[in-house]
Image (tube, helix red, strand yellow):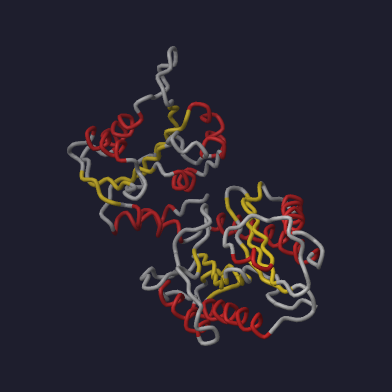
Amino acid sequence: MLLNKIKAHELMRESELDTLVLAYTENVMYFSDFLKVSSNHLKSRLHYIVFFADERLESSYLVPHQDIEDASRHSWIGDLRPTAEYPMEGRPEVIFDKEQAVADIIRQRSPAGGAVGFENESLPVEVFERLRSYLPAVTFKEASKLVKRLRAVKSAEELARISRAMDITQEGARAILGRAQAGISERELAVAAKEACLEAGADAVDFVIVGAAANGAIVHGSPTDYRLEDGDIVRFDLGAAYQGYPGDFARTFVVGSSASEAQQRHYRAVYEAVQAGIATVRPGATAGEVYEAQMRAGRAIDPGLVREHAGHGVGLEVHEEPMIYAGSDFVLEEGMIVMIENGRYLNGQAGYQLEDLVLVTATGNKMLTSVPRTLVRG
């Protein structure tokens, strides 16, 4: 199961919430165990989860009617109700007014109403207004932060999927490093990475960025037909998906057998920043402290190093809490996953980037990535 039910009930009690209503795609996937990609890509086709703080009350899952049979095979929730975006003649069991159905479930199972948590950061205003009109006696409370903290601590099943996604992604990285030499194009390296990931078991390859020389400074640039030359700095960033979970991984290297003094300095700043960030990851540390440790270490070598953020959590989304940025008071806990990331992008020259995935353990941390981080490979 993806959902940590014990943690969910604990956080709901702390926040004095009786019910959670969930509609954001990845939250629904997390709470239901159902990862139907084709329907979940249709963001307007909302699924709903109604989840109660009282463990004795049954959860409900409102699923598009096209997916109801598939959901019944995968979801742990027994009360599945088919929905449609438009009224369906001859199908009276299919729910059209989904917000009314959510309200009915809450009234039936929790007659006192109490406090209902909603996704204040993502729920469409019109949807929220309909829910509020159907439940006038209920107190609605913002719950986006609660759900983010819940999803930040990974279940055993999530850890297994994330680890597999990262292993597969690193096979793509090894394919790039194994083929990279003067004369090969960025696009050819990207194709090699995709093929390696798919062969290793990826469900899909979400992104492959390969940039040599000046192209490496384009943070999210697409691979081009540019052919590598001796002395080029090459930066790549890629992610393969496995059972709903994405990988994310970056490395930087120089083409040939040597790097210039300036190249070594820029790279060493990024490397030492990442090393300092990893060393700071432990239970009780804040995301802000991890950020500050990185930037102190990197700027001691390269004062021009600037970062909006220096890492992020990874789960059903490639960027989620804990986000590593200046001043964040998000406290790390055992079982969280943190992508420690740093980079330097010099327009017209080159890009330098490293990413490594770290698990927060009871006593510190454990690295989940293993591809070497050497700038000069030969």
Picture layout, residue 209 above or below residue 23 = below
Q: What residue lies at 49% left-to-right and 26% top-to-bottom?
A: 65
Left or right of residue 312, residue 184 in this image: right
Residue 196 placement: quadrant = bottom right
Q: Which of 197 and 28 is in front in this view?
A: 197
Q: Position of residue 28 (x, y in %)?
A: 45, 43
Which residue is farthest top?
A: 90
Q: What residue lies at 52% left-to-right and 49% top-to-bottom?
A: 1
Count of numbered circles in the view? 0
Which residue is farthest front?
A: 348
Q: Which of 336 and 168 is in front in this view?
A: 168
Picture layout, residue 199 above or below residue 37 = below
Q: What residue lies at 70% left-to-right and 77% top-to-bottom?
A: 375
Q: Quadrant of the C terminus?
A: bottom right
Residue 148 placement: quadrant = bottom left
Q: Where is residue 187 in the image (x, y as percent from the top left)?
A: 73, 55
Q: Where is residue 218 in the image (x, y as percent from the top left)?
A: 59, 62
Q: Where is residue 53 in the image (x, y as percent from the top left)?
A: 33, 49
Picture layout, residue 157 above or below residue 253 = above
Q: Nearer the viewer, residue 224 or 137?
A: 224
Q: What residue lies at 24% left-to-right and 46% top-to-bottom?
A: 140
Residue 346 placement: quadrant = bottom right
